[in-house]
Image (spheres, rainbow, N blue to C red):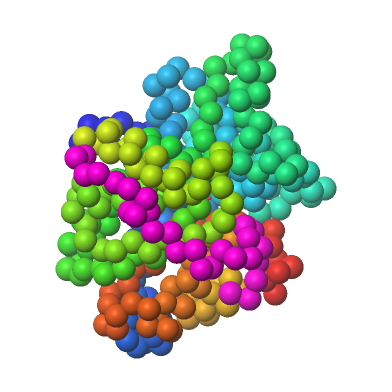
Amino acid sequence: MKILENKFDLGFLPTPLHKLKNLSDKYEDYNIYIKRDDQTGLASGGNKTRKLEYLIQEAIDNGCDTIITGGAQQSNHCRQTAAACSVAGLQCHLMLGGDGPETPNGNLLLSNLLGAKIYFAAEDRKGEGMELLKEELMVKGKKPIIIPYGGSSSNGAMGYVNATKELKDQLKELDITIDYIFFASSSGGTLAGFILGKELFGLTSELIPINIDKTEIQGLSLEEKILDIVNDGKKMLNLKKEYSLRDINLIRGYDKTGYGVIGQNEKEAIKELAVNEGILLDPVYSGRAFYGLMDFLKNKKVPVESNILFYHTGGLPANFAYANYLV
Ligand SMILES: Cc1ncc(COP(=O)(O)O)c(C=O)c1O
C-alpha cells in the first residue's frame, strides 16, 4: 500500500520475535513470546522509531528543516526523535517537563549527546509550549514542524500499521498464532496503529493495551484521543469499518500510582524478565505493562493454553535515571 511505503528508513526492521522459554516453563499454562521493538536500533531503540519513519518523512515532504517535539524529562520519544533528526539532517528542539537536573542522565543525557536543543517547561510534560516555540523559530527564518506528544498522530500510527504486517508475516513463517498481545499504551499511537493494522491485515490476536498514564491529553480522555487517531488513520487507509469508544479497551488497573511513579509492581516485573530471560524492560512503560501480563497469567485472566505475545516497546535508558527506585 502506497501510504505505508512513504517513509524515511530509520529502524533495524524486522525486529526479532522469539519464545520466552524459561518464562513459558515457569507460567506452565501459557506459551509466552516476545516481539523486540526494544531493538529497533535507533540510539538504543524503542517503539517511537517506527512512528518517526513516517513523521520524519512528513517533515521532509513539507520542506521543513526543524523538528519540535515534547514530553517528560525521561521521554524515550524525545530521545529517538533527536536521533532521527541526526540521521535526517534536521534540527531538533525538545520541550521537556521538569527543571533540568545538574547532571543529565538516562534519556535526557542521550538527547543531549544527540545534539538536541533542550528547553525545560516545569509542570508541562506534554509539549504544551510547542506552538509558541514554533512561532519564535519561524521569526528566525526556520521551517519548523511540530511532532505531537508521543509521536501520536494518524501519520505516526502508520508505524504500527506496518508493524502489524511485519508481525503477521513473522507468525506465518514461525507457524504460530497469538491469542493475546500485551503492550504499554500511553499517548496511544501504538494502539491506534495496531487497531488499524489488525483490520487491514486480518490479524486475529486480541490487543491488551496496558494503560500507563492516567491523565488526559488536550482536554480529551485517552480513549477519545486514540479514537480520533484511529478515525483519521482509517481515512488514510481507506478502511470501511466504523470505530467507537468501545473499540479502545485500555486496561486501566495498573496506572493508579500515576505516570513515572515506580512502585513494587514495576520493580518486580523488571526483575522477572531480567533474571529469567536476560531481557531488560524500562520502569515507566514496558515494566508496568509486563507486570500487567504477569498478573493476567498468574490470576488466569486469559484462558489457559493461550499463546501470549509481549510486545516490548523499549525504554532501557530510563532505568539509569530511576536507579534509586530500582535497587
Ligand atoms: C518505552 C515506551 N513504551 C510504550 C510507550 C507508549 O506508546 P504510545 O505513546 O504510542 O502509546 C512509550 C511512549 O512514550 C514508550 O516510551
Q: As rendered, which of 227 and 10 lies closer to the eye?
A: 227
- Residue 180 in view of the camera: yes
- Residue 166 in view of the camera: no
Please report the residue visible at 43 percent of the width from the left and 59 percent of the height from the top.
Answer: 250
Q: As rendered, which of 23 and 290 lies closer to the eye?
A: 290
Residue 238 vs residue 319: left or right?
left
Is 3 drawn above or below residue 163 in the view shown?
Answer: above
Whether residue 171 appears in magenta in the rendering, the answer is no
Q: As rendered, which of 65 and 245 lies closer to the eye?
A: 245
Please report the residue visible at 56 percent of the width from the left and 47 percent of the height from the top.
Answer: 216
Is 295 drawn above or below residue 144 in the view shown?
Answer: below
Name the chief secondary structure element in magenta.
loop
Q: Position of residue 165 (x, y in %)?
A: 24, 50
Q: Quadrant of residue 70?
A: top right
Please report the residue visible at 74 percent of the width from the left and 49 percent of the height from the top.
Answer: 104
Residue stretch rendered in magenta on the structure: 239-265
Is 205 drawn above or below residue 62 in the view shown?
Answer: below
Q: As rendered, which of 115 and 245 lies closer to the eye?
A: 245
Residue 239 vs residue 82: left or right?
left
Q: Position of residue 60 (x, y in %)?
A: 43, 23
Quarter of the picture containing the N terminus is top left
Quarter of the picture containing the C terminus is bottom right
Q: Position of residue 243 (x, y in %)?
A: 29, 46
Is 8 drawn above or below residue 291 in the view shown?
Answer: above
Residue 144 vs residue 299: left or right?
right
Please report the residue visible at 33 percent of the width from the left and 39 percent of the height from the top.
Answer: 231
Q: Count numbered badges in the picture.
A: 0
Whether residue 263 appears in magenta in the rendering, the answer is yes
